[in-house]
Amino acid sequence: MKKLQYFILLSLTLLLTAQVSADSVAGDVVRVVDPYIRAVPPGQKISASFLQLENSSDQPHTVVTASSPAAEVVELHSHIHENGMMKMRRVMKITIPAKGKTVLQPGGLHIMLINLKENLKLNQKVSLTLEFADGSKKTITAPVRKIQMPGMMKKMSL
Ligand SMILES: [Cu+2]
């Protein structure tokens, strides 16, 4: 084999090896499972998105922001108990543990859609983009679904 060919082959091998062993990119290793958006009555300007985040890599990953063409403002939120009341709080990040899963569900973590640009229609597919701490992004579509208020919320309002 000529020297130049050998050199090119060696370079390619090194390049491929380097890519395989590089740190995992969140957008590639975090899977979004069963995303949906809460259906709200026409005229209501806020809604929320719920989903599960699964991280197949051996390092934790963090969602730092989200956006959607359906809403002017999108925030990461959590629910906290304060003086016997359940309140929403904005959080600056949502972490998915290495080889683990983080569930966004009613009464817990959620992605808040604020100032909806149009009324959401049932089963409409809404695009949602998650951005991770490493700068990578993941865009998914979430259907609009009717959901029950969590049992805890019902009890609290009695
Ligand atoms: Cu919220």
Image (cartoon, grey):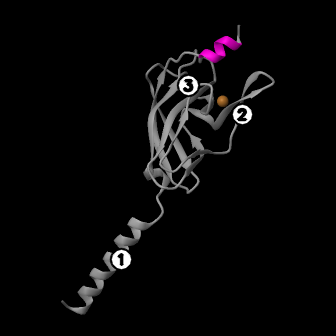
Q: Residue at x 36, y 71 (%)?
A: 17
Name the side, left or right, on which 99 lies relative to 158.
left
Element type at marker 3?
Answer: loop
The residue closer to the viewer here, 147 or 122, is: 147
Q: Residue furthest right?
A: 83
3 vs 2, front mark: 2
- Residue 18, by quadrant, is bottom left
Query: Residue 137: x percent and y percent?
Result: 50, 50
Label 3, label 2: how far apart the Cα atoms are: 24 Å
Q: Earlier in the sequence, mark 2 or mark 1?
A: 1
Give the amino acid at mark 3. Answer: Glu
Query: What residue is shown with label 2?
Result: 89
Q: What's the CA distance linking mark 1 and mark 3?
A: 51 Å
Q: Amino acid at mark 1?
A: Leu
Q: Are marks 3 and 2 in contact (CB under 8 Å)?
A: no
Give the quarter of the figure containing the N terminus: bottom left
Residue named by callout 1: 14
Mark 3 CB lies closer than 8 A to ligand 1: no
Residue 42: quadrant of the picture: top right
Is there a contact, CB below 8 Å, between mark 2 and mark 1?
no
The vertical placement of 96 against 150, above or below, is: below
Q: Which mark is residue 118?
A: 3
Nearer the observer: mark 1 or 3; the answer is 1
User: x, y percentage for residue 2?
Assistant: 20, 91
Q: Position of residue 77 (x, y in %)?
A: 65, 35
Q: How many marks?
A: 3
Q: Amino acid at mark 2?
A: Arg
Label 2 environment density (alpha carbons within 10 Å; few <14, some 14–19, many ≥20): few
Q: Which residues are magenta?
A: 151-156
Query: Which residue is painted at 44% across and 25% down in the image?
Result: 124
Distance from label 2 to label 1 (Cα)?
Answer: 47 Å
